[in-house]
Amino acid sequence: MADYTLKQLNDAAKSDPKGFIKLCEDYYRNQVDSTARELAARRRDAPIVLVNGPSSAGKTTTTGRLRRALEQRHGIKTETISMDDYYRTSTEYEVPFDEENGVDDLESPLCMNLELLTDHLRKLAVGEEISVPAFDFEQRRSIPDVKKLRLEPGEMVIIEGIHSLSDIVYEGLHDMATGVFLAFDSALTLENGVLIEPYMLRFMRRTVRDSLFRNTEVSKTLAQWKSVRRGERLYIMPTRRRATLTLDTYMPYETFIIAEMLKEPFQHLRKELIEAGLEPLTHMSGGFEPLDYIHHIPEDSLIHEFIG
């Protein structure tokens, strides 16, 4: 776990903003490159890559970066499959209920056809063709046989999603797969001594992303957060031990940007933040140096997954 202080980050942002951003980006890129090297070395016995991690750890972008690294640096053609396409049609099962928070448990593995996913991945690993489904989120239904897919000898496939290391998937694939966990283990101590824990920094990422790309108000993301955290506690964190490789996807400079974007809504949602167990975030409204970032963030940066 990396522990940063706001004073350290403010000094870096003030003295050399371009260098500060580059240092953060290089650290993440080096982790991706190192992971890709390890995956390439394992491809003969483990052509399947299972990418997992909690909410807003950067699974989508990191999966894409791993794919490019495998193809461009190691010459390995790599396919990707989204676990979202293996959701079950809502009328075919009873959605589990999160009694702790009084909402549907949309984080539950029971919402997904993990048996079909596991069967498909095993077939891909031995060169068989599969028919990948798709999921219509508007109508909440699965559409079968949308895309044909087959791996040629030496090729790999990456599957990313919160249940990629679950009991059903891992136990069916552990002899031919490598688990990669996006940990986001970093924390930030403010100048008044308040600790912003890793899950709080992820909440900030999620809030901005949902607001910009999913038309979801900050208050709604906040209302869902306890259930999301429950899902992480029950379904994601216990599977971390199954991962062979781990990356920390936090980029310290991102907090300067995201904290500014959330400054106003957080001021109006102080009570709700406290009720959601996020009281330290009520201290995020000041203390950050202005960061000149517009022209210094790479086009393929992970942070674009959240801030656009």
Image (spheres, rainbow, N blue to C red):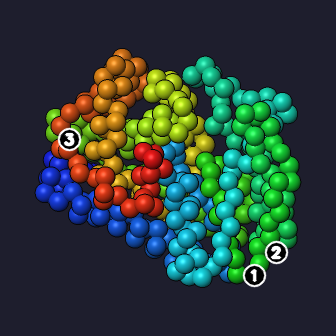
Which amino acid lies under the numbered mark 3 shown in the image of this protein?
A: Phe
**Is disc 3 surrounded by few (<14), some (14 to 19) or many (20+) residues within 10 Å?**
many
Nearer to me, 154 or 21: 21
**Left-right relation of 7 to 54:** left
* Quadrant position of the N terminus in the picture: bottom left
Front position among marks 2 and 3: 3
Residue at position x 59%, y 76% in the image = 71
The first of marks 3 and 1 along the sequence is 1
The disc label shown at residue 127, or none: 2
x and y, in percent, of residue 140 in the image: 76, 34
According to the picture, the residue beneath numbered tag 3 turns out to be: 288
**Is disc 2 surrounded by few (<14), some (14 to 19) or many (20+) residues within 10 Å?**
some
Which amino acid lies under the numbered mark 1 shown in the image of this protein?
A: Pro
Q: Is residue 28 above or below residue 164?
A: below
x and y, in percent, of residue 13 in the image: 19, 53
The kind of secondary structure element at disc 2 is: loop
According to the picture, the residue beneath numbered tag 1 turns out to be: 153
The kind of secondary structure element at disc 1 is: loop
Q: Is residue 276 above or below residue 111?
A: above
